[in-house]
Amino acid sequence: MSFLTPAFFLGALALAIPVIIHLTNREKKEIVDFPSLMFLRRIPYRSVRRQRLRHLLLFALRCLALLLLILAFARPFLESTTAASALSLGPREVVFVLDHSYSMGYEDRLERAKDEIRRQIAMLSPDERASVVVFSDRAEISNQPTSDKDQLRAIVNGVTLSARTTRYGPALKLAKKIVDESSLTRKEVFLLTDFQRLGWEGDEDVWFPADTKFTTIDVGSPKSANLAVTGVILERKKTDRSKNASSSVSVRERLIATARVTYKAPDGDPPVETNIRLLLNGRSLQSKKLQLAPNSSTTVSFDPLTLPGGVSRGTVQLDADKLEIDNAYHFVLWPGQSLNVLSLDGNRGRSLYVDRALAIGERPSFRLESKRMSQLGAADLAGRHVVLLNDVASFGAARARLLERFVKEGGGLIIALGEASGRNSFTGDAARLLPAPLGGSTDRARDWGGTLSYLDYGSPVFEIFGAPHSGDFSAAKFFRYRTFEGPISSGILARYDDGAVALAEKTIGEGRVLVWTSTLDTFWNDLALQPVFLPFLHQLIKYAAGYAEVNAWHTVGEVADLEQFLAVAGEDTASDGERKVDLVVSSPSGTRTIIPPSEERALLSLSEQGFYEIRQAGSGSGTAVAMALASNLDLTESDLAKLDPEELVASVTFRDLSAAAPAAGETVADREGRQGFWWYLLVAAFIALAMETILSNRLSRARTVVSAVG
Amino acid sequence: MAETQERLGQFVDPHVLGRISNLKLLARSVVQGFISGLHRSTYLGRSVDFAEHRAYMPGDDIRQIDWRLFARTDRFYVKQFEADTNTSLTVLLDISRSMNFGSEGITKLDYARYLAASLAVFSQKQRDRIGLVTFDEDIVDFVPPSAKHLEIVLHTIDRVKSTKAGEYRKPLQKIAGAIQRRSIVVLISDLYDEPEAILDAVKGLRYKGNDLIVFHVLDPAELSFPYDGAANYRDLESGEAQPIIPEYLRDEYRKLVQEHISRLTHTLGDNKIDYVLMDTSTPLEYALFHFLSSRERMTRTR
């Protein structure tokens, strides 16, 4: 039975009225004059309210009458029998939505969830069907709806813990899809999870129909305590000895690792003690003791250590707790990279500032070689990342083609213009290197020099200068610069205050050409004397070379570009940059993936925590691992704060308002019949009121008689 | 004169006066008067009570020189005596609406009028000056103290009507400013306010050196709350009504009233103010006799 207007139940508050009437007596219409109520008001009213009730029968009749009136106005009705039978009869379509995010590894949450599913599977009748949806931040349907209990059990048994985070939305959408498509009359969804709050955003836009029963099974603990390494900071410094060494082979680096540890636990729990270790290439090098209060974090700095040559795999690890998976943080240390730069100029001595600027820098370091343009040969470009034409007066067509091919194959070319290099320097094939034909030079000496007024902070060259106080280019004075004759539609990275182009970019093949229209010394400008010169030149060369620093770690769920690792490790021996052999990737769990050369880019989706090993097919398994990639967990999942299951249920289920509408085929008489109870309730209320009147009259009469006698 | 006699008959019962005729209403402290009377004066004058000797100053009456002392000491000394004088009696009569209550024939206001009139006549016989102030939320009538004002006082008492709610602070402070000489001040009221508030209202009178006597007039129903049956009880002062079941509240009410009386006794007593509870069921002459005799005893012992 339901009620059409349940709001009338608020009228039940009126039941207090008879109580008040009884306690304060019925005869309060009589007025007695009294000098002052000063003292009477001081007596708390409770002393009246706590008095016993008199005339209990009268009181009961009044309450009953009120209650009947409220019920009558609330309009009780019987729900449709056909709808009721549809809910209670027929085979079920069951969907088990099982969470296997890594927080389910806390104690035995996943096993308990699987046990519950097995129990539910055992209760399925032969004509009922079930399917399993396994989810973390992604969800997948493990099977088509089936009645085969063995198959269902096998699927459930095969579910393992993932290294991913929790998101309920995708899984619930899949479950809804299954129940929507089902032809069975009864539908039931079981959600088995630890109800992590971070997995629910509240606006997933999933609504299960009213005829679907949604059951939650919470396998989480009301109070969870969890230690986690939430981050590592790696500081690398070259040793003094290696700094003086001319060869990069003997470079040794010192590593200072700092780890951040967080302990989440209910307030009032005792502090936890644990050990934190630093492992390098599988060997434990340092260990420290820690004590953490609930809901606190700390940073632990390890002592500096010397890195071995080559690729090093490191791990910061805590002692095991109830959720062990987030107690380790992995990283891979690649040897410092070096960019090979060839500086070509007409007059020696013009590249002083460039030489000095490129002598500084560790990540990456720059290997600069200077030559005269006339000495350039094809062999000089082999292994070069960047060629710098520093105010070159002229170069022949052959050298121009050489440089063009170099750029097409991915090399970077920086052309710095000046006194020597004018419009006559770039003619014929050389003109193709420029974004537009060159014009004359502009002299700004009369107005005390021009300044740079526009910088494209979106480009990698100027990106690091974008933040406030990150570098002031306006202090530099430009007395002369070259201009382009033709229009440049795109690729302008900087302009002078008169609108002339200062830095332009042209892409040729896989490489790019950057044209700086003034000099890279103090001859035409004083930029070389400004603090921004060094980072500017570094950025310019890194951008020209297409340099990207290798991350020490990735996060599960990211896609890693293995080509980058190949380039850094020098494994790609082909001159044209094309890979000739398969790449074999071993996941932390030992699963092997082969990426053939036919794939345009070697991309790897990271789904596990730990170290991925990358080999080229043909290299023996006994050789040292040349390439490794560290994959860490998304640590948002380490916060085990709980979501109230009721909140989630309320968000995904709702009452279909059309349920109250008459069922198909129902007549008006049927509907009236189902809602006709109010009439009987009203009659009963009037009878109760009539009895109350009679009784109260008798009581008053009896009282009057007694008073008269008294 | 005939009218005065008529009013005397109306308010002053001969039994009352007869009962108290042997007593005196004496001022506790010294008072300022012009004619000799019962009360100690602030001035030295002629009486039988020797006060002190003082060295003779030119201009002193040579009749006051103590010749015996001159014979012994060969110096002139003047003898000084304490003077007795008359005083003023000012009656402050509360005529607020709550006074217009009586459960047994006589209202509190009537009882207070008898009491005021009796005190007026009694004082007149002592040759004291008589004054009257009636007040509710403000001063209603003010008859300044005078030996000739008995008739006006009685006339004012006769036409008293209670129409407004009462207040103490404002009218009593006004009266304190209006009374010039130290005198005996009698407050007749039902004292429906906090004892501290009442003290605050009368302390102006007390601090000016007046001898203050407070008559607390209550109806027996106010003391015992003998009502039966639930009803709406209306406050005569404010007109507000409240449903009350007396049988449930009686004990607590009595306790509160007794507590109020006890606090009044202590609060006023601590400030040297005489406090007298007058139950309107007690005959006036009895209550007045009781008070005057006890006061006389206390005055003698001081």
Image (tube, helix red, strand yellow):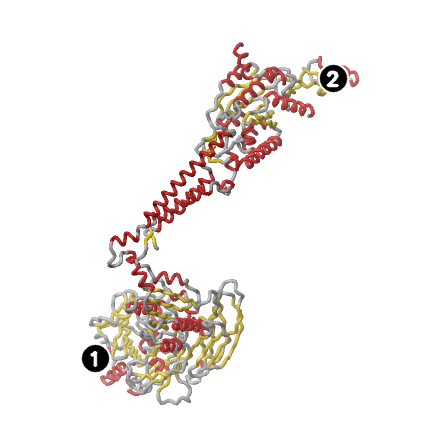
Query: Please, is residue A501 above or below residue B252 in the view?
Result: below
Residue A100 in view, yes or no: no
Judge if badges 2 and 1 mark residues of a common chain: no
Q: Are marks 2 and 1 in contact (CB under 8 Å)?
A: no
Label 1: chain? A
Residue type at the position of mark 2: Phe
Looking at this rendering, what residue extends furthest in the top direction? Answer: B2
Residue type at the position of mark 1: Thr
Q: Which quarter of the figure has residue B279?
A: top right
Secondary structure of residue under mark 2: loop
Q: Nearer the viewer, residue A470 or A312?
A: A312
Q: Residue at x 48, y 75 (%)?
A: A317
Query: Please, is residue B245 above or below residue A424 in the view?
Result: above
Q: Is residue A545 left or right of residue B168?
A: left
Q: Quadrant of the C terminus of chain B?
A: top right
Q: Nearer the viewer, residue B239 or A94?
A: A94
Mark 2 neighbour class, 10 Å CA radius: few under 14, some 14 to 19, many 20 or more: many
Q: Nearer the viewer, residue A576 or B15?
A: B15
Residue A377 in view, yes or no: yes
Q: Nearer the viewer, residue A76 or A16?
A: A76
Query: Please, is residue B114 above or below residue A60 in the view?
Result: above
What residue is pinned by disc 2? B76
Looking at this rendering, what residue extends furthest in the right direction? Answer: B72
Could you say which disc has been placed on residue A191 in the image?
none
Question: x, y (%) of residue B199?
Answer: 56, 31
Labels 2, 1: front one: 2
Q: Which quarter of the figure has residue A482?
A: bottom left
The span from disc 2 to disc 1 (Cα, nearest Å) is 148 Å
What residue is pinned by disc 1? A427
Label 2: chain? B
Question: x, y (%) of residue B63?
Answer: 71, 12
Question: x, y (%) of residue A611?
Answer: 41, 80
